[in-house]
Image: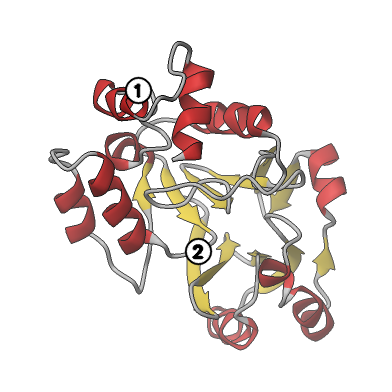
Amino acid sequence: MRMKIEQFRYGKDNLAYLVYARRTAIAVDGGAVDEILAFLRDRRLRLAAVVNTHGHPDHTVGTEELVRRTGAEYMHNGRLRTDGLICLDDETVRVLHTPGHTLDSLTFVAENALITGDTLFNATVGNCFSGDLAAFYASIEALLRFKDETRIYAGHDYLRESIAFARSLEPQNPNLAPYLARYRPEHVFSTLGEERRVNPYLRFNEPALVAVMRQRGLAVDTPYQRWVAVMSI
């Protein structure tokens, strides 16, 4: 990768990121302010911009301080949705509008990695606080178009709890134990291929999950009905 991603933990389970190239970086949901600044100093990187995956306070908590202490540009969500691109040295970070968790949710595409905020977690998805399940469905469908080797970097580390829930729905899924065995809290990520094999919110068309939803009296005739059904479990 010409661009690199560094992950930082803050709060109970939040995950912040620096995406950087040769000389410059952007901070995504930069709540780990001191750790981010130390990393920038150690690598002699200039923080060019601060961005957020969405406007919830646990994701924006470090934004003002990072801007104040570095002179970086704050790139507003609305502008990012319009421009769709962030230049980083000679590289480009692409911005996708992925509403569902919130109406302003964004995903940042850095080569073969997605920083998905609270849209797609490792082994689960975010709550649909926007109330727009159709938009959330479209966002998940858009993310599923990426290649299996695409890395997923989420806004929180809910992995252990999420695998426990997935196991309650698909106890015979042979992919759950290896997925959990690869978990490292110091660097939390998965690939989209792994998510297809374990994440019930990406597996809503799988026969085993469709059977669970049908047993619960939920409508499962169309893919969208199955999406709504799995989101209601």
- Label 2's element? loop
170 or 187, nearer to the observer: 170
Question: How far is disc 2 from disc 1 in space, using C-alphas?
Answer: 31 Å
Image location (x, y in percent) of residue 41: 60, 85
| Colouring used for the render | secondary structure
Residue drawn at point x = 85 percent, y = 56 percent? 76
How crowded pointer 2 is (Cα within 10 Å; few <14, some 14-19, many 20+) is rated as many
Residue drawn at point x = 80 percent, y = 41 percent? 81
Q: Name the residue at the front extreme.
A: 217
- Label 1's element? helix
Q: Looking at the picture, which amino acid does disc 2 mark?
A: His
Q: Give above or below for 214 relative to 94.
A: above
Examine the image and state in which quarter residue 57 appears. Answer: bottom right
Image location (x, y in percent) of residue 158: 41, 62
Image location (x, y in percent) of residue 137: 58, 29
Instruction: Tell me, yes or no, if residue 208 can be seen here.
Output: yes
Q: Give above or below for 27 relative to 204.
A: below
Q: Name the residue at the top extreme.
A: 221
Residue 160 lies left or right of residue 46; in this view the side is: left
Q: Give above or below for 29 relative to 76.
A: below
Q: Which residue is mark 2?
A: 156
Q: Looking at the picture, which amino acid does disc 1 mark?
A: Arg
Q: Which residue is mark 1?
A: 214
First-in-chain label (2 vs 1): 2
